[in-house]
Image (cartoon, helix red, strand yellow):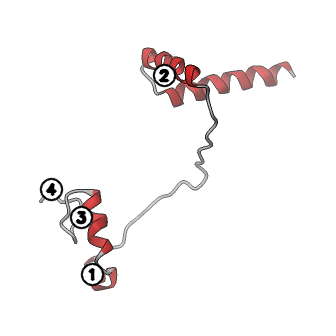
Amino acid sequence: MSDAKSSISQAETYQAIGEFWDTHDLADYWDQTAEADLRVNLRLETTYYPVDRELAVRLAEAARRRGISPETLLNLWVQEKLLEATSIE
């Protein structure tokens, strides 16, 4: 099989696939398509909160030392603090 990411456009990059479909109509290729089984988690949501730049730098360093992403470390710490706060109430 080729290195193409798309069997219809024969494009090798996602950008090239996008460029192909910018100039082509799916109706012209419908007979070459196949049904796909997709699963989507619609409950997953990301909310962004601003973090002071110096805190972000320190967070990234602490996460690097632990071998995890800053996002994971931040979520773990917030979860711990919320558990502490709710157990005090």
Q: Residues within 10 Å of mark 3 (few under 14, many from 20)?
A: some
Toward the viewer: 69 or 60? 60
> Is the residue under label 1 in contact with that under label 4 (CB below 8 Å)?
no
In the rendered view of the protein, which quadrant contains the C terminus? top right
Q: Quadrant of residue 86?
A: top right
Q: CA distance from mark 2 to mark 3?
A: 37 Å
What SS does tag 3 mark? loop
| Residue drawn at 64 percent across, 36 percent down | 49
| Residue drawn at 33 percent across, 79 percent down | 26
| Residue drawn at 43 percent across, 14 percent down | 65
Q: Quadrant of residue 51?
A: top right
Q: Which residue is mark 2?
A: 60
Q: CA distance from mark 2 to mark 1?
A: 47 Å
Seen as rendered, the residue at the extreme left is: 1
Seen as rendered, the residue at the extreme front is: 53
What SS does tag 2 mark? helix
| Residue drawn at 61 percent across, 40 percent down | 48
Query: Eyeballing the image, is 75 above or below 5?
Result: above
Q: Is residue 61 left or right of residue 6?
A: right
Type of amino acid at the residue the image marks with label 1 = Tyr
Q: Which residue is mark 1?
A: 29
Query: Eyeballing the image, is 42 above or below 26?
Result: above
Label drawn at residue 52: none
Disc 2 vs disc 1: which is toward the camera?
Answer: 2
Toward the viewer: 37 or 52? 52
Type of amino acid at the residue the image marks with label 3 = Ser
Which badge, 2 or 1, comes first in the chain's sequence? 1
Q: Which residue is mark 4?
A: 3
Q: CA distance from mark 4 to mark 3?
A: 9 Å
Q: Which residue is mark 3?
A: 6
